[in-house]
């Protein structure tokens, strides 16, 4: 199956997965925001004061080093450290990462990451791709982005649990996102085609979703989403569908709870 | 706070942070550690006599200076794929649950020192029986060391069965 066919199949699959009533896929994903971000590259590091000053407008163009989690509570740049290895990250991805970093907010009060909050106010979300499937995660619920590194496999774990990736003192628990989200579509061919590049960390948990591509980050209005009812028992990890992009918006808290219990995407 | 009080406190913390020694071995590209106190010796691979009717995780028995020792196929026990015996293959003789057994591993690496505080619990998401064998994990020089609880390698019934082989 060609890549475009795979993409098409995945979109159709997602459409069937997410929507109760049939909707027509009218618009493909747009990458224009990424192009705009690319025009404003400024490779200097982000400092605490800058992060705190971030309001609603995007601050873009800061390239995060590979070994640093991109979105973390900022620390004062008092002690100079050795230069971390630079990322083999594409400019586009670096821009998205920088944009995400800029919108993550400072180290003040913990953000309100409840879905009720997202349903009432506009919010920033990161879009990323896995096996042709696009998923969105609210930036406030994003714990960071890491480049994929070596993972150590632990025996006796669910098949979607890739293993542990060590990142400095952190032990990041890597989820094979394609396998978790669509186990029924997962086969040898899909597995061989997967090329995970990044790890999308979920809130302040140790869980990270492996992804192939960072698409963009953008502001979403609550009415642009077809929200799922919170009392719907099935797939609590699915907060709703971003209508324009026809992609799933993740309920990160619910997703973390499921992963902690070793549950698959269809359980719960 | 005075300097002397500060020093005392630091010393107390170090005293409570026990340092443990672990023998490390390799299995399928991963590094595992077992408590050095439970390791009696490490042997090169030699012929292992199969035991008819033994569980699948039992490779067979060896004669260790007059004593019959059961050898466990660690890969099978951990749910990993089997592999060929190589020059690096070793049988680690261990004592667990008051019994002496051998565990076959791909290779033995070294003895490492770990502070207790450097050991984290493993993610508790395993549904497989083998998940309970993992005692903890530790990040050592950028590599993950998986610490195995030998006392849980076999349950009571399995220990009984092994002793009757």
Image (tube, coloured by chain):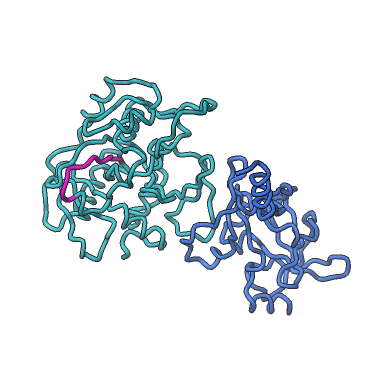
Look at 57% across and 58% down and name the residue there: B80
Quadrant of the rendered image containing residue A36: top left
Vertical position of residue B161 compared to residue B96: above or below: below
The percent position of residue A263, horizontal first and vertical second, equals 38, 62
Visible in this render: residue A121?
yes
- Magenta segment, prevailing SS (helix, strand or loop): strand
Look at 56% across and 54% down and name the residue there: B120
Where is the N terminus of chain B found, in terms of image quarters? top right
The percent position of residue A136, horizontal first and vertical second, equals 26, 44
Marks counted in the figure total 0
The percent position of residue A140, horizontal first and vertical second, equals 29, 44
Q: On the rendered structure, is A148 left or right of A213?
A: right
Q: On the rendered structure, is B63 left or right of A7?
A: right
- What colour do you see for chain B? blue
Whether residue A240 is in magenta: the answer is no
Q: Which chain is cyan?
A: A
Quadrant of the rendered image containing residue A103: top left
Vertical position of residue A262 compared to residue A133: above or below: below
Taking the view exactly as shown, the residue that stands out farthest to the right is B65
Look at 73% across and 47% down and name the residue there: B110
Quadrant of the rendered image containing residue B69: bottom right
Q: On the rendered structure, is A224 left or right of A197?
A: left
Where is the C terminus of chain B found, in terms of image quarters? bottom right
Q: Which residues are magenta?
A: A119-128
Taking the view exactly as shown, the residue that stands out farthest to the front is B2
Visible in this render: residue A6?
no
Look at 31% across and 65% down and name the residue there: A268
The percent position of residue B156, horizontal first and vertical second, equals 64, 77
């Amino acid at each position: 199956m060609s890549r475009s066919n795979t993409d098409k199949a995945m979109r159709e699959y997602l459409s069937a997965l997410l929507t109760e009533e049939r909707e027509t896929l009218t618009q493909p994903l747009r990458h224009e925001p990424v192009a705009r971000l690319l025009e404003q590259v400024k490779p200097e590091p982000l400092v605490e004061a800058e992060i705190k000053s971030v309001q609603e407008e995007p601050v873009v163009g800061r390239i995060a080093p590979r070994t640093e989690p991109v979105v973390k509570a900022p620390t004062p740049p008092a002690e100079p450290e050795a230069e971390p290895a630079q990322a083999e990250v594409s400019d586009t991805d670096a821009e998205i990462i920088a944009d995400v970093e800029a919108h993550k907010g400072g180290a003040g009060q913990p953000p309100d990451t409840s879905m009720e909050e997202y349903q009432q106010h506009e919010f920033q979300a990161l879009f990323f791709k896995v096996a042709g499937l696009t998923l969105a995660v609210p930036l406030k619920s994003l714990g960071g982005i890491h480049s994929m590194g070596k993972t150590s496999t632990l025996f006796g774990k669910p098949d979607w649990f890739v293993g542990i990736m060590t990142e400095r003192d952190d032990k990041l628990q890597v989820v094979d996102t394609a396998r978790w989200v669509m186990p029924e579509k997962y086969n040898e061919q899909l597995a061989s085609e997967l090329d995970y590049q990044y790890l999308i960390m979920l809130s302040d948990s140790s869980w990270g979703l492996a992804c192939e591509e960072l698409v963009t980050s953008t502001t979403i209005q609550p009415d642009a989403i077809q929200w799922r009812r919170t009392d719907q028992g099935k797939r609590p990890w699915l907060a709703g569908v971003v209508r324009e992009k026809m992609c799933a918006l993740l309920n990160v808290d619910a997703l973390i709870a499921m992963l902690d219990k070793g549950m698959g995407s269809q359980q719960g | 706070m005075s300097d002397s009080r500060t020093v005392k406190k630091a010393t107390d913390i170090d005293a409570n942070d026990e340092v443990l020694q672990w023998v490390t071995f390799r299995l399928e590209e991963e590094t595992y550690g077992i408590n050095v106190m439970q390791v009696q010796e490490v042997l090169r691979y030699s012929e292992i006599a199969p035991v008819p009717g033994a569980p699948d995780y039992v490779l067979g028995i060896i004669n260790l200076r007059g004593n019959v020792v059961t050898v466990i196929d660690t890969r099978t026990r951990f749910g990993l794929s089997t592999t060929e015996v190589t020059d690096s293959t070793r049988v680690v003789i261990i004592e667990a649950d008051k019994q002496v057994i051998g565990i076959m591993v791909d290779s033995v690496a070294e003895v490492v020192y770990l502070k207790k505080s450097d050991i984290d619990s493993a993610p508790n998401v395993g549904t497989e029986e083998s998940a309970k064998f993992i005692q903890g994990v530790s990040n050592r020089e950028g590599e993950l060391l998986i610490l195995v609880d030998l006392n849980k390698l076999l349950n009571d019934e399995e220990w009984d069965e092994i002793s009757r082989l």
